[in-house]
Image: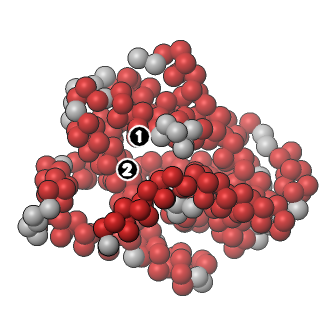
Amino acid sequence: MNNCLFLLKNYWNRYKLAVKFFFTSLLFGILIWKIDINKTIANFSKINLLILIPLILYPIGLLISTKKWQMSLKIDYDYWYLFRLYWISNFFSNFLPSTIGGDSYKLLKLKKHGLKKSFVSIVLDRGSGMLALFFLLMVFAIPIFTLTKNVFLFFIASTPLVLVVIISIILIFIPFKNKYLIKIKNALRKNLSLFFPLFSLSVLFILLGSFSLWIYFYMFGFYLSFFNVFLIYILLRLIAMIPISLNGLGLKEGAMIYLAGFFGISPAMGLSIALVSRMVILVATAFGGLIYLFNDT
């Protein structure tokens, strides 16, 4: 059994890029086949100076993420040094996801303080973000169902947090003999005091992202309530976590089309909004590449 699992893991590590590329191509192929691309491109004429707001909000979001990471590290690192590392890591995550992942870059730069401490800090940073997302999804599962009438979305919105809580309780309070589980358990216990501040900053980050998405809708002439855009945003983040495409390409766009449709927004317009938001992210993270070229310390 262990040999089978080992072989499956090796095959997945070897071919996962090809698999993700296949599904990314398939998803975009379906979108191009189903949607009027000429209308999608024509919608870009609605882009105006409001697009600068999400671009400005991006580094503000990075400030929040950097603070989370600094707190998780428990090392007296210069905040702006970590800020630069975070921006560079986001560049790698978006442009080179298959070769040098952003998290790998952060581990590499902080390895002198021990890989274990650096790894735990990244897990806490990412884990707190996921926990905040799962919490918000569960709290707003009923409004999500009211909006979409989709039982599957209601189920996936309300289930993850319960599973996380159960697993955390098991890891913290039940004794284990496995050395890896013991390490995870000890790390959780040592960092329980960080839970509330990391969770709060994660919620703030999600609200900031929701506001950026609201700006896109407003720019294209759709005056949705912030609450409805917030529901769309947290669902988009959840769907983008499904690991079948490169950086959620095709998944987020398809999800945007589906969710925006509940507000009378055409598929072509939904795709336009999704593509513009992705282009802004690519432009914003590209600045991390410039920092890497000229100020990688």
Q: Residues within 10 Å of mark 1 (few under 14, many from 20)?
A: some
Most distant residue in the top direction: 294
- Locate residue 256, reporting x and y percent: 67, 63
Badge 2 or badge 1: first in the primary sequence = 1
Q: Which mark is residue 126?
A: 2
Query: What amino acid is labelled 1 in the image?
Result: Asp
Q: Residue furthest front?
A: 3
Label total for image: 2
Q: Secondary structure at mark 1?
A: helix
User: Label 2 vs label 1: CA separation?
Assistant: 10 Å
Q: Quadrant of residue 178?
A: bottom left
- Location of the N terminus (image quadrant): bottom left
- Asked whether 216 or 96 is in front, the reply is 96
Q: Residue at x 11, y 70 (%)?
A: 174
- What percent of the width, then of the height, locates residue 115? 26, 36
Name the foreground residue: 82 vs 11.
11
Residue 169 in view of the camera: yes
Q: Is residue 134 left or right of residue 144?
A: left
On the rendered structure, is 198 left or right of 16? left
Q: Is residue 58 above or below residue 278?
A: above
- Is label 2 or label 1 in front? 1
Rate crowding at label 2 as few (under 14), some (14 to 19) or many (20 or more) other CA atoms within 10 Å: some
Tag 2–tag 1 contact (CB < 8 Å): yes
Q: From the viewer's perspective, is 37 left or right of 276?
A: right
Q: Secondary structure at mark 2?
A: helix
Which picture quadrant has residue 249?
A: bottom right
Across and down, in percent, residue 215 comes to 65, 49
Q: Mark 2: which amino acid?
A: Arg
* x 26%, y 45%: residue: 120
Q: Say which residue label 1 marks.
A: 103
**Residue 87 screen position, x and y as percent:** 48, 32
> Toward the viewer: 181 or 158?
181
